[in-house]
Amino acid sequence: MITLFLGAGFSKWAFDLPLVNQLFDFDIEPTNETENRKLELLQSDWSKWKNENLTATEEQFIYWCLHKSSHRRSRIIWYVNRRLTEPFMTRIQGSYTSAMFDERVVRENEQIIKIKGFINSIASFGLRGILTCNYDTLVECALGTKGFNYGVKGEQLFGRGLNPQFPWQNAHVNVTGNIPFAKLHGSLSWDSDIKYTSGKPGRAGKALIVPPAPEKTPPPELANVWALGDQILSDSKRIILFGFAFNAYDYALLNFLKESGENITQVLLIDPYPNEDAAKKLWPKATVNTLNPLKDFNIKEYL
């Protein structure tokens, strides 16, 4: 069985979502004056920080925001959520919201179709499940609610149904797919209690996520997600890591991959700059191969 692990580089390749070092491009369109004010304040924070910390990283700025004051904490969490939700904003009845996973505007998107084809190619060879630390909803949009589950087939999601003009119709949406999907650092479509049919919590800046700061540790609310990830990885002999940087400060994640992946015998790194040494350190008995996603490739040739 195969585990597919999607890093930030996957979302960059698939939908041009920003990596952490590109996160503060402030490329969003505020939908109201409140959002515009938050954006202006964060841009000011970022400008001052960079002038005073010329060699600091984006992760360190996020860490500073999270621990300096409550207003900066809420502001940075709002921005990270909102920036990654931006490509999936849709206008319904005069207001803006996040597109629902199963909507036609999502299903017919060329990039979403590309992602679906990639995942299905792996699934035909025995995909045990998908792991990611990305917050975005690319996998949910690509597979649709009939293509994945968060660990419980039949689990009900909340929010808008299939009809965007009459959202109360078909509103009770359940995930019924066979591919387990563990989002280890949370999701734009989750808050602390509810999983939604779209990135609604991210749109509001209130999603359950572990912000991309150094020394990330998962909150108790994500314990079941990490348990699902352990089940997926421990059942697998092969792992494909797409766009994963093996950042040394992600202690909890790297330790998890090592311990849960003790049965791994084959590793495929899909990355323009693959970190083979880090992979061999985690899985010293495994065979490690690499693939450059910036060139045309057929994943089936490597499975």
Image (cartoon, rainbow, N blue to C red):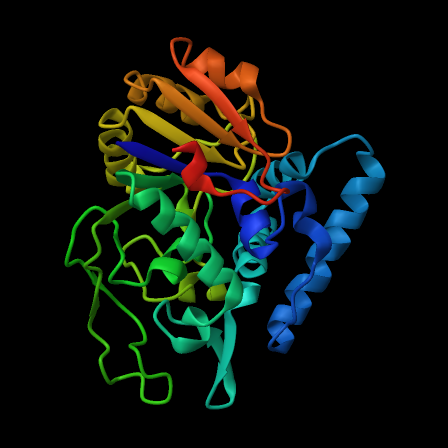
Residue situated in front as seen by the camera: 63 or 116: 116
Q: At 46% from the left edge and 90% from the top edge, which residue is drawn?
A: 93
Left/right of residue 183 with respect to residue 243 in the rendered view = left
> 177 above or below 300?
below
- Expressed as whole percent of the image width and height from the top left, the position of residue 48 reads 80, 46
Q: In the picture, which quadrant includes the C terminus?
A: top left
Question: Image check: 283 left or right of 155?
Answer: right
State how many labels appear: 0
In the picture as drawn, the residue positioned furthest to the front comes out as 301
Q: Nearer the viewer, residue 257 or 188?
A: 257
Q: Position of residue 156 (x, y in %)?
A: 19, 63
Instruction: Work out whether residue 205 can be spotted.
Output: no
Q: Is residue 190 left or right of residue 268?
A: left
* Residue at left offset 49%, top offset 43%: 298
- Say if residue 125 shows up in the picture: yes
What residue appears at the point 50 percent right and 39 percent down from the top-left corner? 7
Task: Give x and y (percent) for residue 148.
Answer: 27, 54
Residue 83 vertical placement versus 119 (above, below): below
Q: Position of residue 4 (x, y in %)?
A: 38, 37
The front one of 79 and 137 is 137
> Residue 173 appears in which quarter of the rendering?
bottom left
Determine the image quadrant of residue 249. top right
What quarter of the picture does the N terminus occupy?
top left
